[in-house]
Amino acid sequence: MKDIFRLDGKIAVVSGGAGGIGETLALGLSQFGAKVVIASRNLEALEAKAREIQEKTGNEIAAIQMDVTDEASVSALVDEVVSRYGTIDILVNAMGLNLKRDAFEFPMEDWDTIFNVNVKGTMVVCKHVGRVMRDKGHGKIINLSSVRGIRGYTGGNSAYAATKGAVELTTKTLALEWAPHNINVNALGPALVITPGTIHIKNDPELAKKYASAIPLGRISETEDLIGACVYLASPASDFVTGQTIYVDGGLTAG
């Protein structure tokens, strides 16, 4: 039982692996022994992050270009990973998009764009990686949800919140449908996380204080706060856990 959280010999794919949360989760999986493939549209950024993570952990990191809204692109990535490594044991869907718009004026093309990335993208990658896991008889899938998936919020987040609610129910439904194949499907539900896209909040003392005051633990989360829950859901420690969302939110959803 001492190695219950180890991922040695496991092959992990992290979509959105060049983004703030994705790259941190890829780093965490690598630190616990997995060989990690990071994927997104920006190959140059991916390759830079892969070199950075490999220097830190000494474990193999590969970068492969993929567009989650293009099913042919997803299928090609899965084929390449299986050709290179033989299988996929772990999938982390860490990509995400939010376009904040006033609900009275929300452009439907923006609504569709957010849903294509956050919902369709999650399902397409689950579908193609899930087939590999089905054929081998086990696998771990971790989707990225949010506290916005279960709590309303102002500020132009109607589309984003709707997508995260959809990710939550997709996660539960796939967990039930794929349980006979020993595929665990779970999700992470963070509150606000400091990434390159939200660093302006951390750098503004008054704004940071406002956001932190809503968190029972009294601070805004960093991407590193998600590593423990992600490794747990990817590891043998969570073999009897499926269809769940772990809210890494400092207690926000507790009350």
Image (cartoon, grey):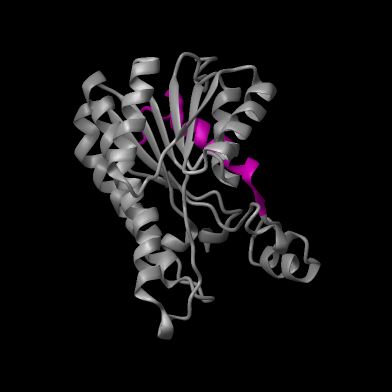
Q: Magenta stretch: dominant SS?
A: helix
Q: Position of residue 252 (x, y in %)?
A: 56, 60
Q: Between 198 and 214, which is closer to the camera in this rendering?
A: 198
The stretch of residues the image draws in magenta is 221-242
Let me know if residue 179 appears in the view: yes
Q: Between 63 and 156, which is closer to the camera in this rendering?
A: 63
Report how many numbered discs are placed on residues in the image.
Answer: 0
Q: Is residue 139 above or below residue 243?
A: above
**Which residue of the protein is positioned furthest toward the front in this rendering?**
44
Q: Position of residue 9 (x, y in %)?
A: 46, 13
Q: Between 4 and 82, which is closer to the camera in this rendering?
A: 82
Residue at the image point whose x is 63% and y is 26% from the top: 51
Q: Is residue 198 left or right of residue 25?
A: right
Q: Position of residue 177 (x, y in %)?
A: 20, 40
Magenta-drawn stretch contains 239: yes
Q: Is residue 37 above or below residue 187?
A: above
Magenta-drawn stretch contains 170: no
Residue at the image point whose x is 28% and y is 43% from the top: 71
Quarter of the image where one finds residue 18: top right
Q: Is residue 8 left or right of residue 104?
A: right
Quarter of the image where one finds residue 225: top right
Q: Is residue 57 left or right of residue 109?
A: right
Let me know if residue 87 appears in the view: no
Q: Position of residue 163 (x, y in %)?
A: 37, 61
Q: Between 12 and 69, which is closer to the camera in this rendering?
A: 69
**Which residue of the protein is positioned furthest toward the right in this rendering?**
205
